[in-house]
Image: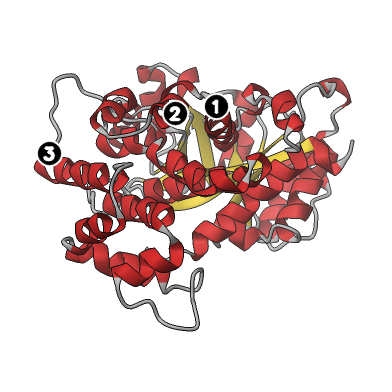
Amino acid sequence: MSDNNVLLARQPIYHSDMTIAAYELLFRPEEGEDLNKFDGNIATSRVLLNAFTEYDLDAVTEGKPAFINFTKDLFFSPPPFDPKRIVIEILEDIEVTESLIAQTKYLKQKNFEIALDDFVMDERYKPLIPLANYIKLELPAMDEETLRSTINYFKPYPCTLLAEKVETQTDYRKCVDFGCTLFQGYFLSRPEIIKGRKLSPNKLAVLQLISEVQNPVIDIPGLIKVISRDTTLSFKLLKLVNSASYRRVKEISSIHMAVMMLGMSKIKSWASLLALSKLDDKPKAIQMSSVIRAGLCERLAKYFGDEFKDLFFTIGLLSTLDVFFDTPLSELVNDLPLTDDVAAALLNYKGKPGLALHTVKNYEISHWKAIHWDILGRFGITRMELNKAYMETIKWANSQEF
């Protein structure tokens, strides 16, 4: 198995206030590889090695702990890594033996933290409970009563309960009410759509601002006027363009200079993103996810042609509007003055921008089998290239100053 065969992504683990507590590192073999021949020990070793060396673990996890599934062999012979930086997950299919319990105690003495993955109430697992720092409860596998009783069972133990596969805001609130304190799943990346609910005045104002900025017929004076009339937006935009990522010999001191230096397309994209940051009812993690999606789309543009660079960034950014406004994307697209090509890419993944967006959205949730690898290959996008672009985008996003 070559290094190219392993795809690596991350999934946030949230506190109850929606700040990020840690990340789980996810990895899979490439599509088409015989899973029976796929060596999980080698894959996990390479993920750990790459994360600590080539990718720089602190950049990938923003200095937060990394939860990593350990196979049985790796659990008994763990790589010599800093225990403060990883949390070892004991998989639910590992047989609980005296030697496993002894090794868990040994790892605890070495200051490693232990998580029991996909925990189910079973007599076999009881010896591990006092040794666990985290208990991961798989939400879809439990009905409400089972979830409640399981959480109550763990109250006497000094462990943290982590609800995983939390897919909706309703599930999240239920887990909070029952007593979980950490949450993993894609509930933050999905809009909470309530029929008949209207946008607040603040959200309407932000949507109007994005509509004006994204108008394809707006000229430079018009764009400068729209941005300049919003003091907060102007300040944030100038701070961004003078940050380390864009730093020039001469400081950019006006919106006019920013447009001239970076171009209309780039300024329109960043102005839209910064406008979204004004929505204070959404956690910063959503904004970061939006930046990463837009940035990864932009990095893929070089394979399709440099003329697509700014367009790909914008489409990646606009594709997250439904989460910010809790409104179906189709409705928001209808409200924005977008070209037919942009709308088709956003709603139906049409054209090269649509292909890039489809790729990025599936990569970020580890749905790697849904990615059209054969089509991407025609443009020179390999698994290794996409994996590298993803990691580079995370590092870049972490360096941005919002």
The label nearer to you, 3 versus 2, is 2
Q: Amino acid at mark 3?
A: Ser
Q: Is residue 237 left or right of residue 40?
A: left
Res 44 visible: yes
Quarter of the rendering containing residue 73 = top right
Residue drawn at x 27%, y 55% is 223
Image location (x, y in percent) of residue 151: 40, 32
- The first of marks 3 and 2 along the sequence is 3
Q: Quadrant location of the C terminus?
A: bottom left
**Element assignment for label 1:** helix
Q: Is residue 222 left or right of residue 175?
A: left
Tag 2: Cα neighbours inside 10 Å, few (<14), some, or many (≥20)? some
Residue drawn at x 40%, y 67% is 260
Residue 124 in the image: above or below residue 114: above
Q: Is residue 320 left or right of residue 370?
A: left
Q: Which residue is identified by label 2?
A: 341
The answer to the question of whether label 1 and label 2 lie on touching residues, with beta carbons closer than 8 A, is yes
**Element assignment for label 3:** loop
Q: As rendered, which of 82 and 338 lies closer to the eye?
A: 338
Residue drawn at x 59%, y 32% is 359
The answer to the question of whether label 1 and label 3 lie on touching residues, with beta carbons closer than 8 A, is no
Distance in Å between CA atoms under marks 1 and 2: 8 Å
Image location (x, y in percent) of residue 337: 28, 35
Image location (x, y in percent) of residue 139: 45, 25
Q: Which residue is identified by label 1?
A: 351
Q: Amino acid at mark 2?
A: Asp
Res 179 visible: no
Distance in Å between CA atoms under marks 3 and 2: 29 Å
Q: Which residue is identified by label 3?
A: 200
Determine the residue located farthest toward the left in the rendered image.
201
